[in-house]
Image (spheres, rainbow, N blue to C red):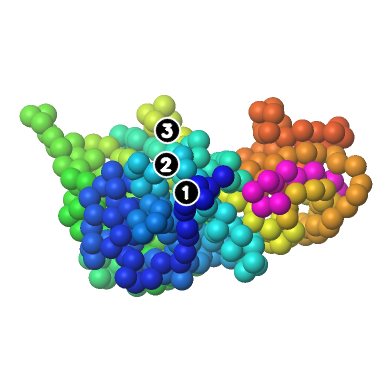
Amino acid sequence: MADSALSIRTIEHSDLRDFQNVLAWAFLDDPRGEDSKWLKVLELERAHAVFDGDEMVGTAGILSREITVPGGRQAPVGAVTVVTVKPGHRRRGVASLLMKTQLHGMHENGEPIAILWASEGSIYRRYGYGEYATSLAMLKMPTRMAFHPGVHVSDTRIRQVTREEAMPFMHETYERVRRTRVGWLDRIDGTWDVQLADRDIDRGGLSSYRYALHPEGYVVFRVKHDGDSSGPKSELHVRELVCETEQAYVDLYRFLLDMDLAGSISFYTAWDDPILHMVDNPRKVRREDADALWLRIVDLDRALPLRQYSSDVDSVLDVEDTFCPWNSGRWRFTVKNGEATVARTEDPADVTLDAAALGSAFLGGARLSVLRRAHRVVEHTPGHVDALTIAFLGTHYPHCPEVF
């Protein structure tokens, strides 16, 4: 319950300095002022602030984006960002007020899905966001590793170029590829500058970005210079690897693995990145998994039909959603030939689950069968959880390569 002394409103341009200060302080950072990269993408009409009297104590924003869902379809999504509570004002309902305002606004506007990256793992499930809607894998591997004999590396030339030369090619390539990758977002004006910000303060002690182009893909990386008396052993930190073909993927990975003066590669990539199965000694590739997107079903009857499904199913879902009560109740979820219909029903429930569990499963990232074992899903009619699990899965794990 929010403190009765709190108020919330959409921000104006005159609020930006306070908005940036609260954002910086909440994340233990220094205020950047007009130098803040988030100003390039912030939508003032979708940015809110909470006030305690005249003092701004909380912030949140929504970016109007498009996400690829199973079936290669594009769906509108509200990308929730810059959610903060000013130190000293926590546990007074500030975050709850921000979340309620956002989700109710998206419901009124007919925006069926919300997504975010969580700075802490214990916050957002209470607002109906499901974890592991997409996952990341941090890969660390030595250079010079050989591929297994079945991997063919082409003789295609890969060119390292300037940022100015790379940008037009990357824009076009990314736009084609993202429409085929579940979990990838469109990139609107300013997004490229945010994702590939390259000022000194963005580098964390690493080099500026390097850009290498293949005719069917590209890779962006930084260098952490290192070495000792035994020779150079710099680290390559890959920011983005985007490929239209599997051959480009092989060629670009080989380009990185053969980089002179480099000793290792680090890369936050898709959970099912095939490099583990391409190299001749997969134990040399170290992988650490992490959650990525958290997804919130804002309007169940609008969201579920947006994607395609892997198998037919007919189940009554009893959905629990106290934060967005219009989703609560029993729904008949029917899939035929990949297409879903959703309708209110009074029939007995086959499965009970909450909105967060449904959000985790929506892109195929989390299995409902696993959530059942975690006591997040309850099966009333035998076989229905397994049938729903198969229906929600896709051929690849969903992946989102950018933080917003």
Give the Cα separation between the discs numbered 3 and 2.
35 Å
In the rendered image, the vertical position of residue 383 relative to residue 173, given as above or below: above
Residue 215: image location, x then y, percent: 39, 65
Q: Does the magenta stretch include residue 236?
A: no
Q: Residue 94 carries which label?
A: 1
Q: How many neighbours does mark 3 have within 10 angstroms: few (below 14), some (14-19), or many (20 or more)?
A: some
User: Which image quadrant: the N terminus?
Assistant: top right
Read off the residue under disc 2: 90
Say if mark 2 contacts mark 1, CB within 8 Å: yes
SS at mark 2 in the image: loop
Front residue (pair 154, 326): 326
Read off the residue under disc 3: 287
Identified by mark 1, the residue type is: Val
Residue drawn at (17%, 55%) of the image: 200
- First to last magenta residue range: 313-325
Mark 1 or mark 3, which is nearer the start of the sequence? 1
SS at mark 1 in the image: helix
Residue 97: image location, x then y, percent: 52, 52
Mark 2 or mark 3, which is nearer the start of the sequence? 2
Residue drawn at (80%, 44%) of the image: 318
Q: Which residue lies furthest to the left in this view?
A: 229
